[in-house]
Image: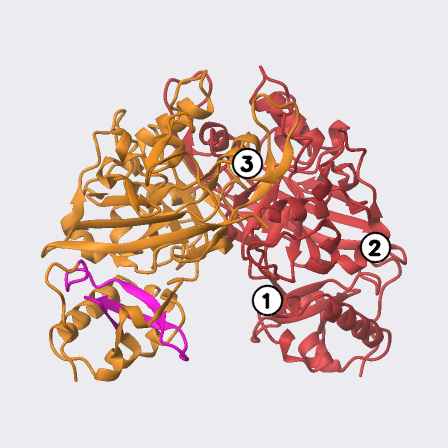
Chain colours: A orange, B red
Amino acid sequence: MTRIDIPEGSLFGVANLPYGVFSAPGTEPRVGVRVGDSVVDLAVALGDDVFARPSLNAFMAQGYDRWVEVRSRITELVTGEVPDEAVFGVGDVRLHLPVEVADYVDFYASEHHASNLGRLFRPDAAPLMPNWKHLPVGYHGRAGTVVVSGTDIVRPCGQRKAPDEDAPTFGECRRLDIEAELGFLVGTPSPLGTPVSIADFPRRVFGAVLVNDWSARDIQAWEYVPLGPFLGKSFATSVSPWVVPLLALEAARVPTPAQDPEPLPYLTEREPWGLDVDLSVTWNGQEVSRPPYREMYWSPAQMLAHLTVNGASTRTGDLYASGTISGPEKDQRGAFIELTWGGREPVTVNGEARSFLLDGDEVVISATAPGTRGRIGFGEVRGRILPAR
Amino acid sequence: MTRIDIPEGSLFGVANLPYGVFSAPGTEPRVGVRVGDSVVDLAVALGDDVFARPSLNAFMAQGYDRWVEVRSRITELVTGEVPDEAVFGVGDVRLHLPVEVADYVDFYASEHHASNLGRLFRPDAAPLMPNWKHLPVGYHGRAGTVVVSGTDIVRPCGQRKAPDEDAPTFGECRRLDIEAELGFLVGTPSPLGTPVSIADFPRRVFGAVLVNDWSARDIQAWEYVPLGPFLGKSFATSVSPWVVPLLALEAARVPTPAQDPEPLPYLTEREPWGLDVDLSVTWNGQEVSRPPYREMYWSPAQMLAHLTVNGASTRTGDLYASGTISGPEKDQRGAFIELTWGGREPVTVNGEARSFLLDGDEVVISATAPGTRGRIGFGEVRGRILPAR
């Protein structure tokens, strides 16, 4: 038996306990929990086969009461002794996509981001559309191209047409960008025809991950009218390997910014589900932005209530992301198109003036939040750009 | 042993042989093939466990050569004798969703439909967007709410705002509509980072189904700018239970209408994959439209090449639909919003002037196409509207 050492100031103390899917060399992927710099094999430590699987889906589907119970058992376990064979160093394992993604939805919930993008994409119109403050605008993305942190991103090709060109050309994306987001994972499914009430959010959503919604801005700008983004987004969406349980985010809950006009009743939040999560975006190792999640206009509870208000069912493994997180300050913008104002105001990265992503660039998004005892971490979502094929 | 009787003029002769998932009372869903008015249990008839499953996915994933081989074995079987215990009357079984849908994409490939919708949704602008003739416009829909024919459709609720209203209100959809489409099912998956060439279409796509993409026009009109349709579509999409193999559609292949401007090389089709499929839409038993698939501007091979040109992977069970099929004539329009010109020109259904769907209404979409010996049928996709909850 082993006592797990938790380094002073670790972002992965007992107030966090995020779940992931890991494999040690020569073994099958299975569910583990991160504690300090260790990963605990839950199938072994708890003797429960629901964790001996290559995704969190089966456990997430067991529902809220079970999530509470398992969290309590893990807390007991890791503050006592754990069987030696259940403990791995986080540097000795490979981390996998933690869930089998069912449907993927991306929202657009930052007022600062939506206003900035409106100014950039539609300079002659009001930056926010008339619907924006009445509902969390969102759309479906491609679930099959959600990949885990560390997966290389091949620069996409496609049709682009600059405003001064007569016709589109085919070629490599020239305006490859990131979007720093939080993603929420549905655990308990809901049936067709039955909306999920806003109050039911914590019983439905299991946890949160970091999301990098890679975006090909030139492809997107040409294709997106009138049915929305498609190939400008669908080549890859990266997520962090650790799923922070919603149960670990109690101390991070804050009210959303004031909402005016008052939302319709189905979107009226009695318990606040804004989240005080601080993100950091580094570009080739240099921090270029610190997006604050607490600035998001719409909460994840409002997003889920909206997503299902038409009776759409949800499935275990549904992932919905917040949309780019941008704050009011320039160095709080979560996409490079905003940070560099369409490329016209480059930022300095390691001494070079940079706007969009070049081949070989690496972007890392990380985040922390207040926990019940010190801060907790989301880990990171990392990706490097490979040349187009 | 039994010889299967195929009635004279049946749309389900040996030139068709569509696959589905069925169950007899008290038994588990499994794969069958339709022949005349019979369903043949393939796990029993061919002694192959890949068919003893509740979806076609495992068989579809086996790839093109296997699809050819199995089709040839079934042809031999049903022109000879079949074990009694493998044969069911089509009226004695329940039909299920034939595939586990991975990602769902909906295109917008009818020039007539896109022009009509443009005139209705954006009366002050050019009906077709500048990108429309350069690429097959498409977007992702909700895979989790794809349902099989016969599933009742609960009228959705949501936010609607009529042009003359100051603010949105919450309530029942008042402009509930259909979209008559064909859907294509990916069998052989393709990896991330690797486009599927247009020539590879018949080796990737297993077959086709009928699709009714139910649409809440008032919800859609308010929400869809700038990220596309979301709740106006995601409450339900119905598909027919029989998957017509692409191998059965050889005689239906026709060139698409002339494409001008010439498509970019990745969209240039050397072998025609337009399809001469005739659809029929009945509203409470009365035929109101006959949409012709041969009028579609973009072919399904072009759609797949476009969908993957950015390196997006595909999975077995991916469903992509054509978008509403509308021909040049008024009685060839595949959506009621077009057929009734936004509700302003009602059609007469069983003696009543009608525009959008009322509770209790039933819509049936069916289709036939030329086969190698007489016509072949797609069966039908049927749905009835239940009152909002």
Horizontal and vertical percent position of residue A124: 45, 15
Relative height, residue A278 to residue A185 (above, below) = above
Q: Please tell me which residue lies in front, A113 or B169.
A: A113
Residue under label 1, please give it.
B55
Whole-number angstrom distance, CA of label 2 to CA of label 1: 25 Å
- Residue stretch in magenta: A11-40
Is residue A153 covered in magenta? no
- Numbered badge on residue B250: 2
Using the rendered image, report if marks 1 and 3 lie on a common chain: no
User: Which quadrant would the C terminus of chain B be assigned to in this image?
Assistant: top left
Q: Please tell me which residue lies in front, B204 or B27.
A: B204
Whole-number angstrom distance, CA of label 1 to CA of label 3: 35 Å
**What type is the residue that disc 1 sits on?**
Ser
A303 left or right of B310? left
- Place residue B241 in its image quadrant: bottom right
**What type is the residue that disc 2 sits on?**
Glu
**Mark 2 or mark 1, which has the lower sequence index?**
1
**What type is the residue that disc 3 sits on?**
Ile
